Image (cartoon, rainbow, N blue to C red):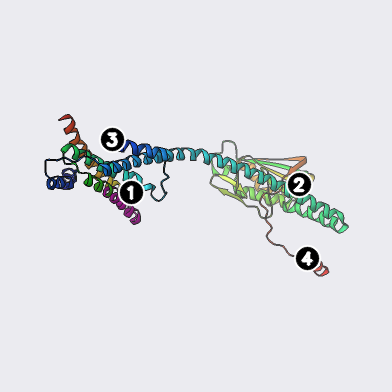
Amino acid sequence: MIAALGLLAGILLGLFFRPAVPTGLEPYLPIAVVAALDAVFGALRAFLDGIFDDKVFVISFISNVLIAALIVYLGDKLGVGGQLSTGVIVVLGIRIFSNAAAIRRHIFHA
Amino acid sequence: MGLLNYITATSLDQDYADVAKSRGEERKDKPRLPGMIVLGLFGALLAVAAIQTASNQSVSASSHDSLVKQINERKTDLGEQRARINRLSRAVTAQQQDFLTATSAGRGLQSRLSDLGALTGAEAVTGPGVRVVVDDAPNASSEKQQVHDVDLQKLVNGLWQSGAEAISINGQRLTSLSAIREAGQAITVDYRSLSPPYEVSVVGNPNDLATRFIATQGGQTWLDLHQLFGLKFDINSEDSMKLPAASRLHLRYAHLEQTRQTAR
């Protein structure tokens, strides 16, 4: 309940305030979203598994976003930003899918 | 495949299991305030990314329109500037005329200028002359039945020789520096390609221009071309012809007249 509330509040705040993203950070936004999505799916699965922990979620979320952005930043500096973001998205995508599969098994028992 | 298996196996962070084990099985944690804040952060991130993508899309769509608009604006600007150039150069010419007609020395200079302008191709010329129309032979099958740059060069040189004052080919005024060349299939005059038939307009004395031309080497060549290969070659006298000024004319060399300079 409180999670859904937080999510809704965040979306509304984002839509309402429309914070301007600095141009330098713009390329990292999609990667950050994917990394955050991974952390959230992981948390949801942990919650359904009954092993959710607030502190672990907060830390995993922040570190996921930061590390994903850092990898892409490093890739940009090395001239392989595109390839590295593809790599990050593939790995995170696989994780999201397998977590989503676990969540599905919990909800539908299938 | 080891890597993929590893990723799927550890898709859930190990920390959740570790913390749950250390905490004990009995009590389950729920998202509290920090979790809520982080989820809010996630929501905000989603919203911002969505807004960003949407606005970028509209930017790329509108950029095409704005580019088209810019191009049109620049085109009108260019047209205005060109009109201004024309206006200004007309004004300069008018002022020059005024200045030259003011004094008798100026009038002499002006008549010299227009004489030279007619000869060099700097000024448009009107007057009687002849019109020479040449073209490939009908149903030309061989190279020899076509008009080449050399043929046109001979024609033009013959015309100069027989006393032509000004010549233009298909409306392109010739100067002493004009180049008649072949580029691919087309003959170019001053790097502008012409299409047959080639109409050579000549200002000069119409009575003896044609007869003198026939006597020149170029005239002989063309008579042969006409008779042997069937190339089209017509000369007609014209009472009045208007030849434009040459388009490519640059000042290459100039010097002050010494006497004038010392007089000042």
In this picture, residue B14 sits left or right of residue B72: left
Q: Which mark is residue B125?
A: 2
Q: Chain of mark 3?
A: A
The type of residue carrying mark 1 is Gly
**In the rendered image, which residue does mark 3 sit on?**
A4
Q: CA distance from mark 4 to mark 3?
A: 93 Å
Do pointers 3 and 1 mark residues of a single chain?
yes
Q: CA distance from mark 1 to mark 4?
A: 69 Å
Q: CA distance from mark 2 to mark 3?
A: 88 Å
Can you give x and y, in whole percent of width and height, for residue B81 in the image? 66, 46
Do pointers 4 and 2 mark residues of a single chain?
yes
Give the residues drawn in magenta, as a range: A63-80
| Disc 2, SS | strand
Label 3 vs 1, first from the N-terminus: 3
| Disc 4, SS | loop
Label 4 vs 2, first from the N-terminus: 2
Mark in front: 4 vs 2: 4
Residue situated in front as seen by the camera: A5 or B233:
A5
**In the rendered image, which residue does mark 1 sit on?**
A82
Mark in front: 3 vs 1: 3
Does residue B120 appear in this view?
Answer: yes
Disc 1 crowd, CA 10 A, few/some/many (<14, 14-19, 20+): few
Do pointers 2 and 3 mark residues of a single chain?
no
Mark in front: 1 vs 4: 1
Mark in front: 4 vs 3: 3
Badges 2 and 3: C-beta atoms under 8 Å apart?
no
Badges 4 and 3: C-beta atoms under 8 Å apart?
no
The type of residue carrying mark 2 is Val
